[in-house]
Amino acid sequence: MDIALIEQLTTGATNDGVQQVVVGAVVQHDGKVLLLQRPEHDFMGGIWELPSGKVEPGESLDQALIREVKEETGLSVTALRTYLGSFDYQSGSGKKSRQFNFAVNVDSSEPVKLQEHDAYTWTSLTEEAPVTDAVRDVLAAYQQL
């Protein structure tokens, strides 16, 4: 991944007053993408989302992405391929958040081992994914690759 791009994204978020930086991964296998379902009792419970999570202090976007995919799915990222854009939202704690999304490669698509979510699915890019509009835009950008 281009270090200059990562620095540019991080600096832009800081300049825009973003309080919480999040990374998201489009994990693809056999023409399908991996979606995770948030626990019902959690913020935005029940929605389907990309593997994603907060960037910890002192951590770069690429380091956070590799860690979060591993923590949430048990899958190992072997490469960050392409930056797919970002979206802003207000977190459950009220923080202005920005999620940076990347297409990634993993060493194997199975087994998926959930740690923080209730379910997972491999969704075909030809069907209407059960996701928020923001994630739908990320998947549309992925399809343009």
Image (cartoon, rainbow, N blue to C red):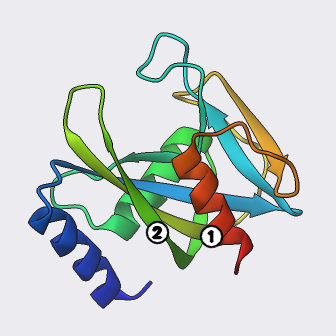
Q: Which residue is mark 1?
A: 141
Residue 86 to residue 84: above or below: above
In the picture provided, is 29 more to the left or to the right than 145? right
Which callout, 2 or 1, points at the residue further toward the start of the chain? Answer: 2
In the picture provided, is 8 more to the left or to the right than 19? right
Q: Residue at x 62, y 70 (%)?
A: 141
Residue 113: name its quadrant.
top right
Q: Is residue 76 visible?
A: no
Q: Residue at x 16, y 61 (%)?
A: 58
Do callouts 2 and 1 mark residues in contact (Cβ within 8 Å)? yes
Secondary structure found at label 1: helix
Foreground of the two, 112 or 98: 98
Q: Position of residue 139 (x, y in %)?
A: 66, 60
Q: Position of residue 42 (x, y in %)?
A: 44, 17
Residue 34 has which mark?
none
Q: Position of residue 57 (x, y in %)?
A: 16, 53
The three-letter amino acid code for the residue at tag 1 is: Ala
Q: Residue at x 74, y 62 (%)?
A: 28
Q: Residues within 10 Å of mark 1 (few under 14, many from 20)?
A: some
In the picture provided, is 52 more to the left or to the right than 54? right
Residue 125: name its quadrant.
bottom right
Q: Is residue 61 visible?
A: yes
Foreground of the two, 64 or 36: 36
Q: Which residue is mark 2?
A: 85
The quarter in which the C terminus is drawn is bottom right
